[in-house]
Image (spheres, rainbow, N blue to C red):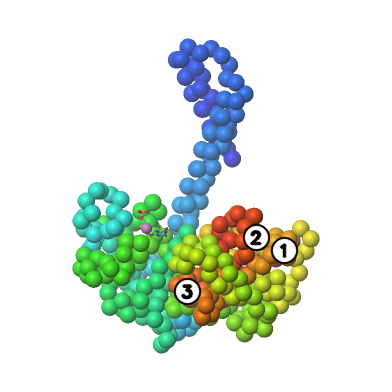
Amino acid sequence: MKKTLIGIPVAFALFNIVAYLTGCSNKPSDASLEKLRADAIAQNTAMVALQNKNKTQENWQFVVQGKTSTGKPLPLSLEKLEALAKTSVWTKEPHNTTNSNPNTIFHFRGVAVSTLLKEVGVAPDVTDVTFIAHDAYRVTVSLADLRQYPIIIALERDNQKISRSDGGPLYLVFPYSQYPQLQQPYPDRFWAFYLTDLVVGTEPIRLKVGKRVLTANALEKLEPVTLEETVGYRLGWPAGKVKLYGVRVRDALSAAGLIIPPGGAVIVRGKSPIYRDPNKPIQLQPSDIDRCNILLATHWGNDRKPIPAKMGGPVTLAQSSACRTQSDERRWVTFVEELEVTK
Ligand SMILES: Nc1nc2c(c(=O)[nH]1)N[C@H]1C(S)=C(S)[C@@H](COP(=O)(O)O)O[C@H]1N2
Ligand SMILES: [Mo]
């Protein structure tokens, strides 16, 4: 707050100097004062955002979950990952930001995904692993390839921590130079930045609704609803209309014994930090919940397959186009974990 106040006199002084140099003796107009004030506030906001960013960087948590031997999520701090970061990879980098030579070889050091998988154990029916990023980006890699190649969660590039603007603090790195055969199944876009989660296979449904946890069984007891829509998920879904099957948010709330009080709303939380920002929660208004089908989708397509982690499952939030009036694109939430009723 203080910084806003400091910003104004400085900007004001600058304005006066400019006015003097340009021979303009007019007093600043209301509009220009307003602009100075807005600039100062913007500067302050940027500063606070930077501070928050550095803070999250320190508290960064990576969670390993899904079909592991315990089935329990395992949170790993950067410190814990650092202790496991024993694998080095020398490779060219498709998103090389340091120079213009695409063949520059970098030294990445990090945690081999195979090491992590050994630590947590993998259920026998698992075929792939999905990595999720801070911005809800996700990539899926086959378990066999993760076991065969040193694909790493990098913490360092050329002996330096990887900055947020270079995709850090955790960056998925493929040993392209040593194993060029990885480039075709895992092209550039697989190098995912700012990783926050690793999901082994697809998780079983465990949806927290208020104080209750609804499993697949509980959801199957509710009225099934089908929606056919063009979906707004960030990636990995067909472009045209897609069939989605699930239950209404409304019905899930009643199954958990929840009523939205007057003036209340429903907060939806998904795995990625952008889906659980306490300052900017994803909120469903009671009028929307009543007016249109807002769905907790669990299956998709003509053959009604379960939504895999590869597509953001087992539970995603979906809505009919009638609900698009409220245009928060984040409302196509993947990896939905929790509904909370606010007062
Ligand atoms: N977390 C995250 N990682 C990501 C992406 C993203 O949107 N989020 N985009 C991918 C894609 S499609 C490409 S082409 C590159 C983009 O890298 P660049 O922004 O350095 O060009 O990052 C990949 N990794
Ligand atoms: Mo891309």
Residue at numbered disc 3: 309
Q: Nearer the viewer, residue 157 or 222?
A: 222
The quadrant the N terminus occupies is: top right
Q: Do the residues labelled 1 and 2 touch (CB within 8 Å)?
A: yes
Sequence-wise, which precedes: disc 1 or disc 2? 1
Which tag is nearer the camera, tag 3 or tag 2?
Answer: 2
Q: What is the three-letter code of the residue carrying label 1? A: Arg
Q: Residue at x 21, y 55 (%)?
A: 104
Q: Furthest residue to the right?
A: 262
Q: In this view, does 197 lie to the left or right of 101?
A: right
Residue at numbered disc 1: 291
Q: Where is residue 86 in the image (x, y as percent from the top left)?
A: 29, 70
Q: Nearer the viewer, residue 298 or 50?
A: 298
Sequence-wise, which precedes: disc 3 or disc 2? 3
Q: What is the three-letter code of the residue carrying label 3? A: Ala
Q: Can residue 75 be seen in this view?
A: no
Q: Distance between the residues labelled 1 and 2?
A: 8 Å
Q: Residue at x 61, y 71 (%)?
A: 227
Q: How far apart are marks 3 and 2 (CA)?
A: 25 Å
Secondary structure at badge 1 equals: helix
Q: How far apart are marks 1 and 3 (CA)?
A: 29 Å
Q: Position of residue 63 (x, y in %)?
A: 46, 70
Relative to 15, does residue 228 appear above or below in the rendering?
Answer: below
Residue at numbered disc 2: 323
The quadrant of the picture showing ligand 2 is: bottom left
Which tag is nearer the camera, tag 1 or tag 3?
Answer: 1
